[in-house]
Image (cartoon, rainbow, N blue to C red):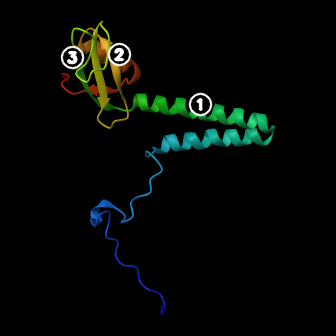
Amino acid sequence: MSGITPLAPDRGWQGNPARGAAMGRVDSGPHVDLETARYRAAIYQRWIDAARGAGSLSWKANRDVAESEIERFEREIAAKTPRQFYLRQIPLDSGGYDSGGSYWGHGERLYRFESVDGAAEGYLRADRRPGAMVEIRKSYPAAVFFGEAA
């Protein structure tokens, strides 16, 4: 072992060993569950197999089909995933503006929803809070809301 210098212990991110690698953590994106990863692999394998026997025009078309299939599958998984949501009414003034000056117009009450994990968010209009919950559950059937009676 002569000539080899041992590595110093990793100090961690910003000197805190509990916070991961000292130079930051390489992360290519959100973590994917095993079912989604297997589905992606199967779709891409079908794309590769189809492209092998076809010309270059089919290569791009098959890739686009594979990617749209994966997106559809991921939307289905996201809809089935139980999520806790914040749901609050956004007050509008008599001109239809919110406190930040954005114009929303007039109509039913404006609500903002956001999941605790930040994966789902948006705005919608509904007459009352229970109606807003019904609308959100059309896209996220397993949604649970803070302040909702169990």
Label 3 neighbour load within 10 Å: few <14, some 14-19, many 20+: few
Q: Amino acid at mark 3?
A: Pro
| 54 sits left or right of 143 in the view | right
Specify which label sits upstream in the sequence, 1 or 3.
1
Specify which label sits upstream in the sequence, 2 or 1.
1
| 56 sits left or right of 34 in the view | right
| 69 sits left or right of 88 in the view | right
Q: Position of residue 7 (x, y in %)?
A: 40, 79
Mark 2 to mark 1 CA distance (whole Å): 25 Å
Q: Are marks 2 and 1 in contact (CB under 8 Å)?
A: no
Q: Position of residue 57 (x, y in %)?
A: 77, 34
Can you identify the residue that label 3 sits on? 91
Q: Is residue 48 above or below residue 123?
A: below
Identify the secondary structure beneath mark 3: loop
Give the number of the disc on residue 68: 1
Specify which label sits upstream in the sequence, 3 or 2.
3
Q: Amino acid at mark 1?
A: Ser
| 116 sits left or right of 4 in the view | left
Can you identify the residue that label 2 sits on? 135
Mark 1 to mark 3 CA distance (whole Å): 38 Å
Q: Is residue 101 above or below residue 94?
A: below
Identify the secondary structure beneath mark 1: helix
Residue reaching furthest bottom?
2
Label 2 neighbour load within 10 Å: few <14, some 14-19, many 20+: some
Residue visible at 28% across and 67% down?
A: 15
Residue visible at 48% across and 45% down?
A: 34
Q: Position of residue 69 (x, y in %)?
A: 59, 31
Residue visible at 76% across and 34% down?
A: 58
Q: Are marks 1 and 3 in contact (CB under 8 Å)?
A: no
Label 1 neighbour load within 10 Å: few <14, some 14-19, many 20+: few
